[in-house]
Image (cartoon, rainbow, N blue to C red):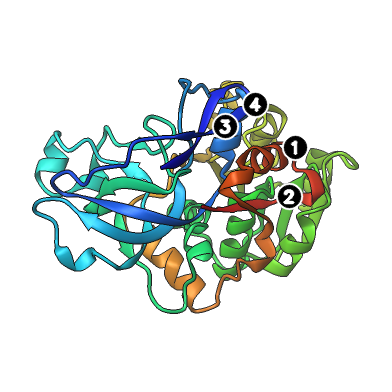
Amino acid sequence: MRAAVLTALETVVLEDRPEPEARPGWAVVQVESMSLCGTDVHQYDGRIDTPFPRVPGHDFSGRVVAVGEGADEGWVGQPVAVKPSLPCGDCLECSQDKPFDCKKKKLIGLWSDGCMTERIAVPVVNLIPRPEGVEAWQASLLEPIAVGLNTVDRLRILLGETVVVLGQGPIGLALTRLCALSGAGRLIVTDAREAPFEVSRAYGASDCLDVTQVDAKETILELTDGAGADIVIETSGFPASSAMVLDVVRKEGKVAHIGWANDLPPLPVIPIMAKTLTVFGVGGNGGRGQYERAQELVRTGRLDLDPMVTHRFALDDIAEAFEVASSKSGGAIKVVVAP
């Protein structure tokens, strides 16, 4: 079985790996589509620590080809999306059949070998039936939407509020659309490239700021008459963006931090206290119906994923796929890979 393997920084190769086995309570999924996430790219470029060798990837969909003892045989042959966080199976929450409350759950592809392979074994509880009307490539893009939904659920956006989304990668773009659907008024987005702004505008952004051309902090304050935004969401994981968040949110506003990398600055406490802010750290997709709701938004056409996918590769070309995703060459936003 072929698998993409990170063997060193900026080095990914195809290797033969043993076929996965469906142990009790698990299923083997034939991977039909996978997409590269910012986490995968940061493993590749070294901004997130990862042990080598590692099969990366956690955003994927496919079809169940086998199940282990105790699992419903009805899953076999079913098209599925897959939640990417593995519950430990041993804690109190897991023993009470609450696997997504597991405090030890770990991301596939980061703490264990991931989905960039032809077949993968996952717990049956991670499977989500993929309905008619949702294609495999769409189901492999549910993670950024689910993370966005987890964020919006916590922020409780009010109709007409001013929202800033820092970064317009896949999660940032998903949040732009979700904030628009949630009733944001002025919706300001930033990025260091012009490439994603066409999608941002289509998703509902009112103001697009290229941080290489304007002073984003100064411009956001000008657009909000010096008060700052009601809500600021940081998705990029870059230090300069993270450092700006508390300066562009209004007094008694809300902040959400999503972007993750090793070199982020510490969050200062005094500005949080002085502005009486509410700060949310969003570490994933939530696991409480966000994936299922994300899929429903796609199925009903509320969230069109076509504009987000800029590049498609075969697994044989995985090295090129990682290079494009890392360098963002050719206006890359979301890179999709098919085995």
Quarter-wise, where is residue 62 in the image?
bottom left
Disc 4 designates what residue? 10
Q: Secondary structure at mark 4?
A: loop
As drawn, which residue projects farthest toward the right?
213
User: Can residue 95 be seen in the rendering of this structure?
Assistant: yes
* Residue depicted at 23% across the width and 56% down the height: 66
Q: CA distance from mark 2 to mark 4?
A: 17 Å
Badge 4, how many Cα within 10 Å: few under 14, some, many 20+?
Answer: some
Give the residue type that dot 2 points to.
Ala
Separation of residues labelled 1 and 3 (CA atoms): 18 Å
| Among numbered discs 1 and 2, the one appearing first in the sequence | 1
Amino acid type at circle 4 is: Glu
Q: Which mark is residue 327?
A: 1
- CB atoms at circles 1 and 2 under 8 Å apart? yes
Residue at 69% x, 65% y is 307
At 55% across and 29% down in the image, what residue appears? 43
Mark carried by residue 13: 3
Question: Which numbered disc, 4 or 3, marks the residue closer to the eye?
Answer: 3
Q: Can you see residue 225?
A: no
Q: Nearer the viewer, residue 251 or 176?
A: 176
According to the picture, the residue beneath numbered tag 2 turns out to be: 332
Whichever of labels 2 and 4 marks the residue nearer the N terminus, that label is: 4
